[in-house]
Image: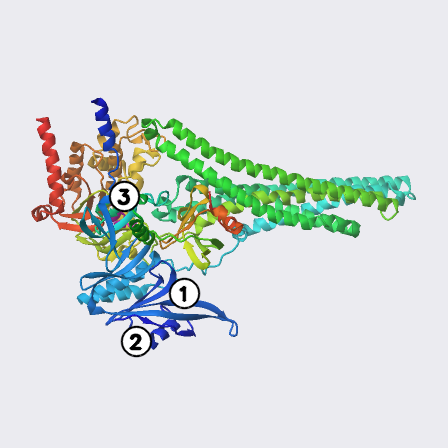
Amino acid sequence: MAVKEKQTELDALQADFTAPSRCRFYQNARGFLCLALDGEDKNRVQLTRALPISDPEKYIAVTDMESKELALLESLAALDDAQRALVAAELGMRYFCPKITLVKSLKEKMGSYYFDVSIDGIARAVTVHDIGKSMKQLEGGRILLQDVDGNRYEIPDVFALPGKTLRILEPYLY
Amino acid sequence: MGKKKHNTKISGGKSRGFSKDVLALLEAEGLCTEGFLLTAIGDMDNDGGYCNAWVALDEAGLYIATGREAIYRDKKRKRLRAEARLSTLEAIPLRDMQELRVERYATTARLVAKRGGEEIALLRFSLGRAEGFARICALHGAIREGKEADRARILADAEEEKLCERCGGAMPKTGKCPRCSSKRSTAVRLYTFFGGYKKQVALLLFVQLILTVFNVAMPKVGTEMLFDDVLGESAAGLAEANKLAMLGWLVLAVLGLRVFGLLSNMASDYIQAIIMPKIAYDIKLKIFTAMQRLSVGFYSSKQTGQVMERITEDAMNVHFFFTDMLPFGPLHILKLIGVLVMMFQMDAGLSLVVLSILPPLLLLLGWGQAFFRRLHHKTWANHAKVTSLVSDNINGQRVIKVFSKEKEEMRRFTKLAASYRDAQNAYTKKETLVMPIFTALTLCLTAVAMTLGASNVLGGRMQLGELLAFVLYINMLAPPLEYLSFVATPWAKCADSAHRIFEVTDSEPDIVEPEHPVVLPDFRGSVELLELDFEYEPAHPIIKKLHLKVEAGQMLGIVGKTGAGKTTIANLISRLYDPKAGSVRIDGVDVKELSFAQLRQNIGLVSQDIYLFGGSVLENIRYGKPDATVSEVIAAAKTAAAHDFILCLPDGYETRVGNGGQELSGGERQRVSIARAILQNPKILILDEATAAMDTATERSIQESLGKLKKGRTTIAIAHRLSTLRGADLLAVIEGGELKEFGSFETLLKQKGEFYKLYQTQQKALAAVSSIAD
């Protein structure tokens, strides 16, 4: 009896994930992502990552347009290929984060930092205000950068990029 | 409407908004660009690829063109030129769109229109462009609904957005374009700190020049002249008495040189002792002044350790360089020049051999400076992390103890401290490796010079005294060279620290006082929030289109769930932050126009985060009004129901509180904080959950006292407990940053909306408690 009670207490502390079989994502005629939950059409939905940095493929909240949670997916891996592709495309759009392949230069003027970077060969200028806050170094040389407008960029592994990038960024890392 | 494919090419100059090329292309497509009311430029296609999109709104419709625009250098005309290509052009009649809005996501945004009851995604763009598109949406709404005043305001706001005349980029409200401001090197900027001490610096350089002359003359007089002119062959023909007389003169000359050298040295040290600490003090003062000038946002975005490091360690590094390194710089450089002059004058060939060391030395110095600067930054960053952890641990000791996390915290500390140790070790190891290289270079040089010089003496091309003096000069080269080799590391430290110091002193505060502020002759205290929008992080709106008004002397209660944006409203009224759009008006004047002094003097804020400074209770209550009498302080403390507990403290009003002082409970701290605000006697009093940590009886007592003080004062109270707000003239219910309900207590209850639900929930909870008690 006591063991059973203990088990019930532990269950109460587990997140209530939605079984993937209950969800059917689809795109409406205008290309917006919609959801049918248990066969009931919920129309347009929004997707939010609970761990956007460390585990972007897991713990995805599905909310209606008023931000009311409709479902909580434990992992995208549990969805079938077609459903996963739909969800991944929507997440990719909401969490658009191009990968920087080279930092060509970094200039500081009056407390603002001007990055001249390359994203898959395309030159891009990125302006950052508070570099200590806007550039985060994570484990394994991963760097996240957020510019003054809220756009985000990622360097998956700064040590794997040409040495120039590391030399330029090193004074602002750690 | 229809989508057309284009592939036109044109080149031309650039003007504000769309480039002339793009305007020409659009005109070629039959659009009247002069009729454009507002424009915005997008930067993405719907697949997330980068491209250009030009969006314009006029009286008839919305136009969306996509394509590419590139800037290139025209080699013939030697100037920049723009080249644009249009791919698609879409025109949507205004009457067809019921709604036009911007949907903001985590990092991107999308322009969405509602047509025939159906939503259509029009264009995707990066978040940074969202504001321009949001303005187009607002204008579309104003045109559709025929709101002429809104339309005029939106267009006026768009006009007001200033661009830098030089680079065309957006101009910050400070009026200084960061891209076009001159950037001087760290060294030159540090040099400016000497600006106020020009005379002393000139005197110091003069004294050091004299000192160098004495030092450099010493081997010539004391060695070369003694060995060659008195003891050498050239003196062989002189009488003994003459030789002794010459020796006497030489001894006197050496003594004179030594004494004057010593006096010059003393004078040099004295001048340095006067000016260097002053300069170090100036630097610290400049950092602290800049930090006071900066807005709240600067501090909330930084770790405590980082801020502390800037005031303490960074200023210390610059101070060390200024006091222990820099003063010897001119001396060593002058000595180096003087010694080289003497050596060339003695033997140019041998001197050239000595000089051959300088190019590799200079190369080594340049490399060493950059290398040590990087190493120092790593050490600094690790030290800042350790300081932050220690600060966190001190502040969070109770939580650590309650959760029994001492060992875990110890592990975290050990890990960070080890990183700091490793970084410091790496720095020291490299430093110890570099130093012997310079010593070895000097030794090699002496050996070479001795060998070549001895062969010159044997060949009769040089005298013995001359060689000995030459060797002494080589030895005299060692300190300046060692200094130059050693100075690279402290300079690297200093430059790295100075860089961070300038980052603080250069930062422009977000909240700026206008050049000619408005000073209200009669500050009454009416507060009006006009279409207020605010966000701490881009694209995460906290306050949305908030619109309400409180007349002077009224009490406004703000209720809402946690995270609804209530405290943000208090921060915006106090102008700790500026709204993203809309305005806060006091007595009809935008707070951005008011003088800081008048604003701070007339707005009292008792916030949830109570901070008591290290000092007595008396000093803490007097913080806003240092000249308040004890009688006034006691009256304020009584009103805040703080008087009784203060008297129970060991030293009454003189009990030390705050950092390292007497421990006060949450409720006691709140009461001291309320007393502080009451003493300031502001026209607008903001109480942000000011009585949340108090028992009901104390809260009621404070409310009664505050009720007496309400006359002629606007009170804005934020509270969870609705009983706290019973005396409010008006209540605002905030949900998700929006105003849901607004009116008197009774009106809102009658409306049976959100406020009614909240009231019912709290009443039921109270009833449940009563029934248990019964």
Q: Say what secondary structure mark 3 lies in.
A: strand
Q: Say what secondary structure mark 2 lies in.
A: loop
In terms of depth relative to the viewer, which is nearer, B572 or B289? B572
Question: Can you identify the residue that label 1 sits on?
Answer: B168
Task: Give the position of the N terminus of chain B as an image quadrant.
Answer: bottom left
In terms of depth relative to the viewer, which is nearer, B284 or A31? A31
Which amino acid is tagged 2? Cys
Where residue B260 sits in the image (x, y, percent)? 69, 42
Q: Which mark is residue B32?
A: 2
Q: At 23% across and 32% down in the image, what residue appears? A: A12
Lateral position of residue B337 relative to residue A131, left or right: right
Which amino acid is tagged 1? Gly
Question: Do marks 1 and 3 share a chain?
Answer: no
First to last magenta residue range = B567-575
Q: Say what secondary structure mark 1 lies in.
A: loop
Q: Quadrant of residue B328?
A: top right
> Distance of mark 1 from mark 2, alpha carbons?
24 Å
Q: Quadrant of residue B108?
A: bottom left
Q: Chain of mark 3?
A: A
Residue density around tag 1, few if under 14, some if 14–19, many if 20 or more, within 10 Å: some
Tags 2 and 3 touching, CB below 8 Å: no
Residue density around tag 2, few if under 14, some if 14–19, many if 20 or more, within 10 Å: few
Q: Which mark is residue B271?
A: none
> Distance of mark 1 from mark 3, alpha carbons?
47 Å
